[in-house]
Image: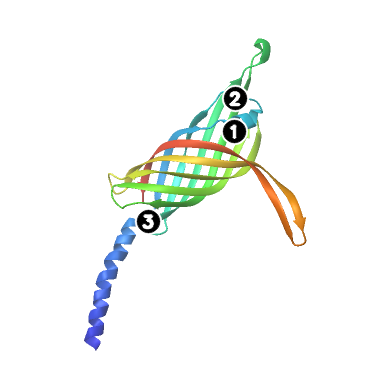
Amino acid sequence: MRSAFLAGAIALLLCVVPRVAEAQAASRVEVTAFGGYRFGGDFYEIASRRPVDADGAASFGVVVNIPFTRETQIEALVTHQEARFTIPGADGVDGQRFRVTVDQYQLGGLTEFGTGRARPFLTGLLGLTRYEASGDHELRFSGSAGGGVKLFPTRHLGARLEGRLFATLVDAEADVLVCSPGFCVGSIDASFVWQAEFTAGLVVRF
């Protein structure tokens, strides 16, 4: 009886230990510094309160990924975009120059598909967007979703290619349509600013 128990325990250890070691080897913190281009100039029009002939600007930032399970990671994103443009004045008058910055601070998750050198992924985050122009700034709730691929030619260095869509809530109004005792029906009118971003980054795994 004792020998059977011992043999079962050894067999269990032989099965569990390699899996634990494999999970530890796969579970590594990743830090990605990236740059790219973000399309969508609605923030510029909101900041200047005038139509703007600018569709986008360069962006850069950092993504940190912390292992959660073998296929999923907790993801934190900080990204910055800055645009400078001039609104033409009337009757030959010099136009007004504007500088608009858009910063995203978001937290969420990432799911990888596969464990090879090329790893497709999907990501979804929630957080805040801060945009500023001429010393005035606003802070709004936002979210983003995207996907791409991570390429790891070596164990500790890789590349990350990604496309991401940002949605920022810039205005919301709630109306009550009808109420009865203990029950109300209403509507919410929300306005979003949408931006699409394409980036490439260097991944460092620790």
SS under mark 2: loop
Type of residue at label 3? Glu
The x and y percentages for residue 46 are: 64, 32
Q: Which residue is the site of mark 3?
A: 71
The x and y percentages for residue 14 are: 24, 71
Q: Which residue is the site of mark 1?
A: 43
Q: Does 108 sit above or below residue 194? A: below
The crowding category of the residue bearing disc 1, from other C-alpha atoms within 10 Å (few below 14, some 14 to 19, many at least 20), is many
SS under mark 3: loop
Give the camera-side residue of 163 and 189: 189
Mark 3 / mark 2, whichever is N-terminal: 2
Give the camera-side residue of 9 and 53: 53
The x and y percentages for residue 136 are: 66, 34
Mark 2 / mark 1, whichever is N-terminal: 1
Q: Which residue is the site of mark 2?
A: 52
Q: Residue at x 41, y 47 (%)?
A: 31
Q: Does 122 sit above or below residue 8? A: above
Pointers 3 and 2 in contact (C-beta within 8 Å):
no
SS under mark 1: helix
Type of residue at label 1? Phe
